[in-house]
Amino acid sequence: KYGQSGIEVSDLLPHMAECVDDLAVIRSVHADMVVHSAAQYQMFTGRILPGFPSMGSWLLYGLGTESKSLPGYIVLPDPHGALEAGMPMYGNGFLPAVYQPTHLRSGPKPVLNLDLPKGVTREDRLRTLGLIKGLDQADMRPGDEELEARIGAYDLAFRMQTEAPEVFDLTRESTQTLEMYGIGNPITDDYGRRLLLTRRLLEKGVRFICPVHGGGPGNLQWDAHEDIEENHLRMAAQSDKPIAGFLKDLKQRGMLDSTLVMWGGEFGRSPESQGSKGRDHHNLGFSMWMAGGGIKGGQVVGATDDIGLKAIQDPYHLRDVHTTLMNQLGLDQNAVSFLHQGRRERLTEVLGKVITQIV
């Protein structure tokens, strides 16, 4: 047990244990699917099929963006590869294309070609941009959202050449900050860099950021079918210090109160063994946590049964997590809707409830 709240934390997460008083741990989350792709769609979009907007797109649609020089919704992928549901689960679905995410690259250059080519001036680039915009507008028809989004993307790309290089330059950070995120340690460097970049993007007004941890084939994710101890030891070692550093950094800078942090996956692992040392997918009871953004930290909500098979105390569906997310950002799940094929669509299908114990 750790912190003044005395919350139990796994030995795999010693750095997260130092932040436990800021966390609201929900130990009774449940969902509908045990197949990765459908479960990931539900986690991001509230539905088990592709084609629906992700929570990032819904929030951008409901809140707009504070930054005119950076995208409002950014995904920072894991360098090992994509998750099973792929890029569509992050997408804007039937919302206008302006609400789609921007996927950055992994590694030291998240965005290529930010610098002007040799011999090209800013005025040259402006003239080129004006020519492209004129051609696009000449072909535009009323209500052509795709073309409007394309024009906006060109304008945004030009503005990014001014502001983005500074944002992506992590050498501007102090040695103490880099160490806090685990940057420089080969185990934690990658995720530490992406979380530090997340903080820098938040400072510039980016509305929604998804820094993915775990990607690619099987055991490179938290998908411990073979050996759960080996898998979780490795994955926790990569993420524990960067996540704790991110939370501590936000708190030190006075950003945590205005930043809602949510951590979790599409399901948990089964209480019974699978094969030898592995565990299967399990959607009937698993844990997620939230911090910041007005969330009351230092508490645990809900519980599974004694063997972790099913959420039995204060069970909360993923749509309740979505509803709470929207509530904390000042959005009403009923009001944020979009007319699609004659039906008012919403992230939560108006079925979610706020997890009142943590707000």
Image: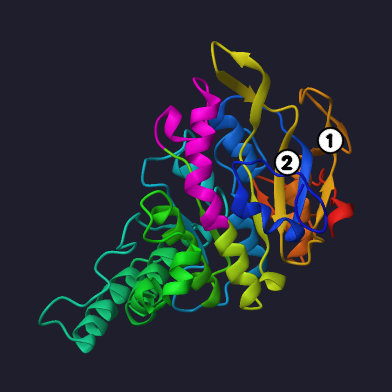
| Point 64% across, 38% down: residue | 42
Residue matched to label 1: 303
Q: Nearer the viewer, mark 1 or mark 2?
A: 1
Residue 3 in sight here: yes
Q: Secondary structure at mark 2?
A: helix
Q: Is residue 119 left or right of residue 327?
A: left
Q: Amino acid at mark 1?
A: Ala
* Residue 239 highlighted magenta (yes or no): yes
Number of other residues with Cα within 10 Å of mark 1, as a class: few under 14, some 14 to 19, many 20 or more: many
Q: Is residue 319 left or right of residue 354?
A: left
Query: Which of the two residues, 201 or 53, is positioned nearer the viewer here?
Result: 201
Q: Amino acid at mark 2?
A: Leu
Q: Which mark is residue 123?
A: none
Whole-percent x and y of residue 211? 50, 54
Whole-percent x and y of residue 108? 31, 62
| Point 78% across, 44% down: residue | 26
Q: Is residue 290 left or right of residue 220?
A: right
| Residue range of the region highlighted in magenta in the rendering | 216-243
Residue 205 in sight here: no
Query: Which of the two residues, 100 or 82, is positioned nearer the viewer here?
Result: 82
| Point 48% across, 71% down: residue | 177
Residue matched to label 2: 318
Query: Which of the two residues, 38 or 264, is positioned nearer the viewer here?
Result: 264
Query: Which of the two residues, 16 or 79, is positioned nearer the viewer here?
Result: 16
Give the total of numbered labels: 2
Task: Spot the residue most to the top.
Answer: 275
* Residue 142 highlighted magenta (yes or no): no
